[in-house]
Every structure is written in structure tokens, then in C-alpha cells.
Image (cartoon, helix red, strand yellow):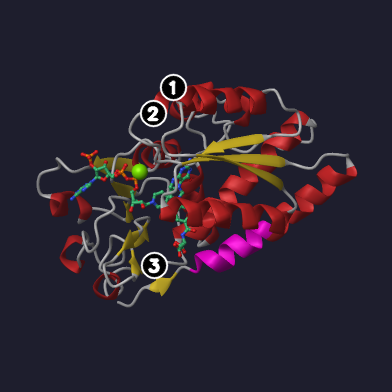
Amino acid sequence: MTARLVDGIAVAAKIRTELKERTGRLATAGCVPGLAVIMVGNDPASAVYVRNKIRACHEVGIHSSRFDFPSDADPAEVLACIRSLNADPTVHGILVQLPLPKHFSVPDILEAISAEKDVDGFHLYNVGGLVVGSTVFPPCTPYGVVKLLEHEGVEIEGKNVVVVGASNIVGKPMALMLMQREATVCICHAKTRDLAQFTILADILVVAAGKPNLIVPQMVKTGAVVIDVGINRLPDGRLVGDVDFAGVSQKASLITPVPGGVGPMTITMLLANTIASAERRMSLAEPERS
Ligand SMILES: NC(=O)C1=CN([C@@H]2O[C@H](COP(=O)(O)OP(=O)(O)OC[C@H]3O[C@@H](n4cnc5c(N)ncnc54)[C@H](OP(=O)(O)O)[C@@H]3O)[C@@H](O)[C@H]2O)C=CC1
Ligand SMILES: Nc1nc(=O)c2c([nH]1)NC[C@@H]1CN(c3ccc(C(=O)N[C@@H](CCC(=O)O)C(=O)O)cc3)C=[N+]21
Ligand SMILES: [Mg+2]
């Protein structure tokens, strides 16, 4: 079997066209959605993501503002910045780029963001919403994966899903969202013994571990849908996912490439959450399920 390739750039472009129509309607109602991005330190990968996010905002008619702090910044200054953005009616979304320097408490920072502006979906209130199935802001990466699966016509209900990776930003919310859609979900992590024993059962395999070539063909069921969330920069400069793409492509029915798979969807869902936040403020919102 040779897998069909999922074009994340094309699906993202299609969604962004719809988002542009929504910002157009908001503009008619006198509202420009605003996203504030806070970055602490100068991690080169983070700087690239932040630049990409800001460029994508402008493409769809979202106003973005950027707040940069040095890597030795006092957390109190960042908290003060978040509080002033919470109170600013022109700001509908606030994102603090992760990771943060070691002397920061990530939970303290995330909990300071107003839940109504937490477009990353990382605030405890939004995490709780995800658990009970009434999400306000679905976290962007898992939300993007669900949108990709929907776009490709992949049924989720009743399927065996294995999520490799259990982080708060990808693995756990991914598992919850697919469980909400009535898949049978298994979560694996670094302490999982004999990973292959689990992955081989997956009808849908989502990999978000940050380990190049973690998933090789022997670990994948013939005909599986394979979603590679991993982003790894190799010493030679190449960007690869967590899946042995050439090998697994011969066994899967559908596979996402890196780059050009989940990544562009993540940014697109950040735009979608920011627009949804503005629509809620303007009472133009159409409710969307987690
Ligand atoms: N495409 C996109 O839009 C995005 C991509 N990413 C990428 O996705 C990857 C994961 O990101 P993130 O969740 O933030 O990473 P974290 O490092 O926070 O979490 C990695 C998870 O993978 C697990 N893990 C590590 N090694 C193994 C292994 N050998 N076998 C099984 N599980 C393992 C860890 O287990 P344990 O919990 O036991 O430590 C942990 O749960 C990274 O490559 C990141 O760059 C992230 C966000 C967005
Ligand atoms: N508060 C916060 N929210 C996040 O959503 C968040 C974060 N912090 N910290 C880092 C991770 C990582 N992340 C990515 C987003 C887009 C691509 C992306 O667009 N990738 C392109 C390639 C980009 C490249 O060439 O480097 C692709 O896969 O095609 C990747 C990774 C969001 N994250
Ligand atoms: Mg991480």
C-alpha cells in the first residue's frame, strides 16, 4: 500500500479563505480581531514561529501586536504585561510563546491570561472545558489535527486511536478531543514499555514525541492513518517529523508530511480561535464543538 499524502498547506489555505470572510463581517460590524504575542528570550525556533504567526494574522485581517522580553526578564513584568492586555478591549487573543526561561513558572503565566482571551487553550478553565466536552478554545495543534482528519473524510467514531506523547500542549488535549468524538484512545509516553505493541493496533496514529524516526513501518498497521506532529531539526539542517516517512508511507493509507502537514494547521487554528473570540465579544459567534 502507498499512502495518500495530506497537504496541510492546502487545507490551511482553504480554511484561511473562510477566516478572511469572517474578519470581513467583523470589520463591517466595526471590529478588527487583535492577537497579542508575548515572547521571552531569543530562542531562534520560537522567533521563526512567532514571525510566521504574525504574518498569518495579517493575511486574514487580524491585527497583531508583539511584546518581547529579554531571557532574564522578571516574571512580574511579563505578568503586568498580561494584565494590561487582559484589560485592553482591542485585544481578543493573548499567546505566550513556549518554552519560557527556567526561572518562569509556566502555570503561573498561563493562569494569568484571561480565559476569554486564551486562544492557545492552555488556561486551566479551558483545559477543564476540554475534559467535559464544552471547550471554549480548542488547543491549536490538536484542533488542527481534527480539522485535517475531517477534511480528509477520516471517520473517528469507534476507531482505535493511539497518541504517542502526553504533553499538556499536544498529546493530552489530542487524546481528549478524539475521545470526545468517541474513538477508543490509548496514550503512550516515554515510560511506555514496548511502544510497538500499542501503535500496531492504531487505525489512527498521532505521533507527538519530538523523536526523529521513532515510528518505523513494523510499528504501523497496514492501512492506518498516520499523523506526524513532531518537528525535529536534524544536524544537517533538515526538518523532519517523528515518523520514518519513506518507510511508513508504504504501509499507511494516509500520512502527513513534515513540513507541510500539521504545522500550517496549528497556526491556522490560532487565527480561528482569535476570530472566534472577537465574534463572541461582538455576539456574532457560531458555536463550534471541541
Ligand atoms: N506541528 C506542530 O504544530 C507542533 C509540533 N510540535 C512538535 O511536536 C513534538 C512534541 O511536542 P511537545 O508535546 O510540546 O513535546 P514535549 O517534549 O513536551 O512532550 C513529548 C512527549 O513525548 C513523550 N516521549 C518522548 N520520547 C518518547 C518515546 N521514545 N516514546 C514515547 N513517547 C515519548 C514524552 O513522554 P513523557 O511525558 O514520559 O516525558 C512526552 O509526553 C515536538 O517535536 C514539537 O516540536 C509541538 C507543537 C506544535
Ligand atoms: N504558546 C505556544 N503555542 C503554540 O502553539 C506553540 C508554542 N507556544 N511553542 C512552540 C510550539 C510549536 N508550534 C508550531 C507551530 C507551527 C509550526 C509550523 O508551521 N511548522 C511548519 C514548518 C516551519 C519551519 O519551517 O520551521 C510545518 O510543519 O510545515 C510548527 C510548530 C507551536 N507551538
Ligand atoms: Mg514542548
Q: Position of residue 159 (x, y in %)?
A: 35, 49
Q: Amino acid at mark 3?
A: Leu
Residue depicted at x 48% and y 41%: 97
Q: Residue 167 colored magenta?
A: no
The Cα–Cα distance between marks 1 and 2, rounded to whole angstroms, is: 8 Å
Q: Residue at x 53, y 22 (%)?
A: 112
Q: Position of residue 235 (x, y in %)?
A: 26, 68
The answer as to whether callout 3 falls within 8 Å of ligand 1 is no
Task: Using residue 205 as the reference point, say whether residue 37 is left or right of it.
Answer: right
Q: Nearer the viewer, mark 1 or mark 3?
A: 1
The span shown in magenta is 7-16
CA distance for labels 3 and 2: 40 Å
Q: Badge 1 is on which residue?
A: 108
Respond yes or no on whether mark 1 lies under 8 Å from ligand 2. Answer: no
> From the viewer's perspective, is 247 left or right of 181?
left
**N-term-proximal mark, 1 vs 3:** 1
Residue to which mark 3 is pinned:
254
Q: Which residue is mark 2?
A: 104
> Closest to the observer: 122 or 146?
122
Q: How many marks?
A: 3
